[in-house]
Image (cartoon, rainbow, N blue to C red):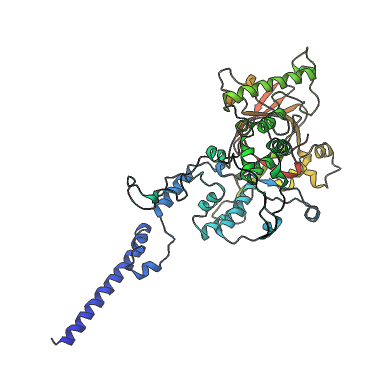
Amino acid sequence: MDPPTEQIQSELENFREKWRAEVSARSRNITAGPSQRSQQQQKPTSTQGGTSSTSNKLPKRKATAKTTHQVEDDDDYYRTQTYDEPEPSSSKATGGHKLGQQDVGTSSAEKQPQTALDFYEEAVEKETTGKLGDSLQLYRKAFRMDDNVDQAYRNKYFPGRWNKGAQVNRSNAAVTVPNTAHHSLEGPTLSLPDLIASFSDLRIKGAPPECEGVAPPPCPVARLPDEILVNILRDVAIADVGDFVRLAQVCKRLAFLVVTEDQIWRRICLGSEFGFGGMHYHWQRGIEWEPLSAVELDDDVLTVDEQERKHQEESRANTNVLLHSLFSSSWQKMFRRRPRVRFNGCYISTVNYIRAGQASAHQITWNSPVHIVTYYRYLRLFRDGTAISLLTTDEPTHVVHHLTKENVALHQGSTTGAHLPSAVMSSALRGRWRLSSAADHSPDAGLADMESDLYVETEGVVGPKYMYRMELTFRSTGKAAARNNKLAWKGFWSYNKLTDDWAEFALKNDKPFFFSRVKSYGVGEL
């Protein structure tokens, strides 16, 4: 052959080899699994592999994460709801109340979701309020936009709680090889006690000058001595312990005082505003809110006032014992971990279950209809030992602002207020509450379990001859800082006063109570 023919033949062979390689690469991309496709996409030799979709990144880690999520408890990711005080304009127009979360304005409620995380957040809110149909549609939209949106949600609201894996080796080197890429670029991370201790020598700094050559604005609080500043912080803590804790976000000096001033936490724990001075370990009222009779006092020698002082002394003695035995002599740790009732909100149990329906006799259908049943249990506890229990299908936004003693008295046995927004309180039950004590447990029970239960007794629905008794136990859920914000069921009974019989209710579909802050309550009725 002449040289031009050989050149053409070699070019044809090269073209055929490239064409075969391209066809075989395409066939492997179609039949290969996600892991093989991702490996081929990382090779720079294929132009199509570099432009293909990257939605299958790290398939092994994704599968592991899903397996881990299945064994977790969904209550660990419960977000505590906050119910704002109703606005006059909105309440008059709609006859209802607006549900808003903390630090979220009314404009955000009108904002339409745009991203997958927005749809997922709205779906969680719908599910919390019991709207399962709407939440299911929003979940589908969110996962269609991003199949890892659940991980993004947990990273946003619960960082470090679910993903506790080992640190990533950024340099891909052996673990035994010393390399600066294995360590943080900002130096060693201090523990929380060491970090707070490093703030001890700092002072409050005023705002910088607005422009160069101008004197900085005055900062009177920076000139105060620590003795006066501690007294101011104590008054803030007595008014609202939440505002006192949020002062730690102002500057490092206030953060040091909030965390380390044990005398302020001692006043909070021993006080009746938010601490254990307002807890009751004995019945304080009757079921219908009447004063206790001599039979219920179980003491013919002491008067009511003397017995109340006796109970306060016992409570103070138990507090001192628990302080040194369980909480390492830390008043702050006691306030966070010891079970206590909260009065600036209410406890809500959202119950959802599916009930089979009946197919129509006039139509031929392949599927049988089902009904999603949703109802709510509300429980509000007052400082004087009284309680309000309510079972209704109305949503929390239409109920929580009406859980008051005045509305119970208005609608109790009367139909005059049936047209009012608070008409739902006609089904409310009066009751009383107390915490468990050593007398309610066996002698071999631990100190931590003696005060972990809550007893609630309410009047019956069908008449005065019945009485209901709920036994609940404190649990923690949600954020790591939130403790004892969940009430799990231990039992629910009905007592017949005439026959002295107890009957237990089945708790097949009932869910635990979760605490929700209601801003219109303030700090609770004093």
In terms of depth relative to the viewer, which is nearer, 315 or 51? 315
Q: Quadrant of residue 456?
A: top right
Residue plotted at (66% across, 54% down): 208
Residue 62 x, y percent position in the rendering? 43, 52
Q: Residue at x 73, y 18 (%)?
A: 310
Outermost residue, top side = 301
Q: From what the image shows, is residue 302 above or below residue 191?
A: above
Q: Nearer the viewer, residue 69 or 328?
A: 328
**In terms of image quadrants, where is residue 460?**
top right
Residue 76 location in percent, x, y? 55, 42
Residue 296 seen: no
Locate the N terminus and report the quarter of the image it occupies. bottom left
Screen quadrant of the C terminus:
top right
Indicate left or right for 181 with 229 as reference: left
Closest to the observer, 496 or 323 = 323
Question: From this viewpoint, which residue is outermost toward the front?
Answer: 213
Farthest right residue in view:
416
User: Residue 143: image x %, image y %?
Assistant: 52, 57
Q: Which residue is painted at 41% across and 49% down in the image? A: 168
Residue 419 image offset from top left, x and y in percent: 83, 47
